[in-house]
Image (cartoon, rainbow, N blue to C red):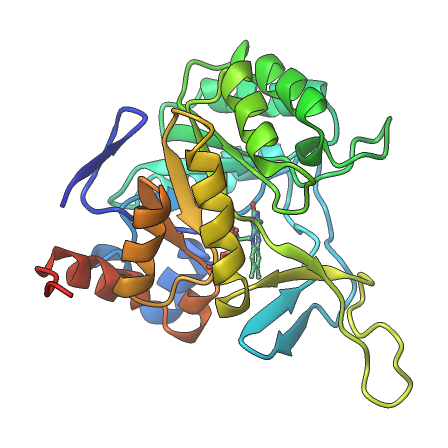
Amino acid sequence: MSVELCGMQLAHPVINGSGTFDAIAAERVFGTELIELFPFSAYVSKTITLRAREGNPPPRLWEAPAGLINSIGLPNRGLDAYLAEDLPRLARLPVPLITNVMGSTAEELAELAGACETRPQIAAIELNVSCPNVKTGLDIGSDPEQLHGVTRAVRRRTGKPLIVKLTPNAADVPACAQAAQDGGADAVSLINTLRAAALRPGDRRPWLGGGTGGLSGPAIRAVALAQVAAVAARVSIPIVGMGGIQCAEHAREMIAAGADIVAVGTESFRDPTVAAQIAAQLREPVASP
Ligand SMILES: Cc1cc2nc3c(=O)[nH]c(=O)nc-3n(C[C@H](O)[C@H](O)[C@H](O)COP(=O)(O)O)c2cc1C
């Protein structure tokens, strides 16, 4: 069952989607047992930015049929607080730590990667490129040229495994994956949430404080399968597949589509132990069809 991802030895092929499992809060709420029986084989932090962000005003969540729209807005206390306060706690987890970072320019992302590079507790870096470039206004991750430049800039600053988390909100996702690979990424992960909106019942004004949000959960699984398959046909680096995975069969399908390992996101809100159940079921032999 153990798998290797970019040189990291993982006990099984199920990790978490960034921002969907707060390991520090989980220890506070569920006690050390959940941490000792940690459901994921590597832990991906929520997105960290150079400076602190408050996130979006409430409401931040909308339950859609078979999915969730979130407009959290990546609140975090910034790089320095992450390194000083969160990192020592996350380093106690019994699995490799992947730090997810986001910036609105190549320089910002390179600075974040450079800071991670100096910390042995960080096993790998995931780049969240679902962010508008402050200069061009274009989403960094939806434009292959920009994505290539950003990945190269980050690559120069770190020898740690580099995973580029692709956005599904792009005209040509395989071209973006190719750009990440050519820029020096060691792996790609996909899919992030799909841009979505919800209207308030009654006056039909935007429900979410941030205006729009990102759709996740079962509603996006078919999209994720298609995008993972298209990316697998294009690149040779490993793929972390995610989007709507709820059970072992969904994980098997994602792997059949081309993913090397999978990540569980929204489903962990319903049951924080679901990833452990999926990993256990993946160990069981599959009945032939
Ligand atoms: C509440 C919430 C917060 C998220 N926060 C982040 C984040 O901080 N960084 C990131 O790269 N992705 C974030 N995501 C996206 C997930 O990591 C994942 O890519 C997406 O939800 C698809 O997987 P799922 O359908 O299993 O949730 C978030 C998703 C949700 C639902």
Could you tell me residue 239's position as x and y percent? Answer: 39, 36
Outermost residue on the front side: it is 289
Asked where in the image residue 108 lies, by quadrant, the reply is: top right
Asked where in the image residue 195 lies, by quadrant, the reply is: bottom right
Outermost residue on the bottom side: it is 202
Outermost residue on the top side: it is 156
- Looking at the rendering, the quadrant in which ligand 1 lies is bottom right
Compared to residue 180, the image places residue 1 above or below, namely below
Viewer-proximal residue among 81 and 267:
267
The structure residue drawn at horizontal position 76% and vertical position 58%, both measured from the top left corner, is: 56
Q: Is residue 164 left or right of residue 273?
A: right
The structure residue drawn at horizontal position 51% and vertical position 66%, both measured from the top left corner, is: 217
Compared to residue 116, the image places residue 263 above or below, namely below
Image quadrant in which the C terminus is located: bottom left
Could you tell me residue 109's position as x and y percent? Answer: 64, 25
Q: Is residue 102 left or right of residue 257?
A: right
The structure residue drawn at horizontal position 26% and vertical position 63%, both measured from the top left corner, is: 248
| Label tally | 0
Viewer-proximal residue among 151 and 158:
151
Compared to residue 80, the image places residue 29 above or below, namely below
Viewer-proximal residue among 15 and 259:
259
Could you tell me residue 264's position as x and y percent? Answer: 40, 57
Asked whether the viewer can see residue 15, the reply is no
Viewer-proximal residue among 260 and 213:
260
Asked whether the viewer can see residue 238, the reply is yes
Compared to residue 44, the image places residue 181 above or below, namely above
Q: Is residue 16 left or right of residue 182?
A: left
Asked where in the image residue 115 lies, by quadrant, the reply is: top right
Could you tell me residue 50's position as x and y percent? Answer: 67, 32
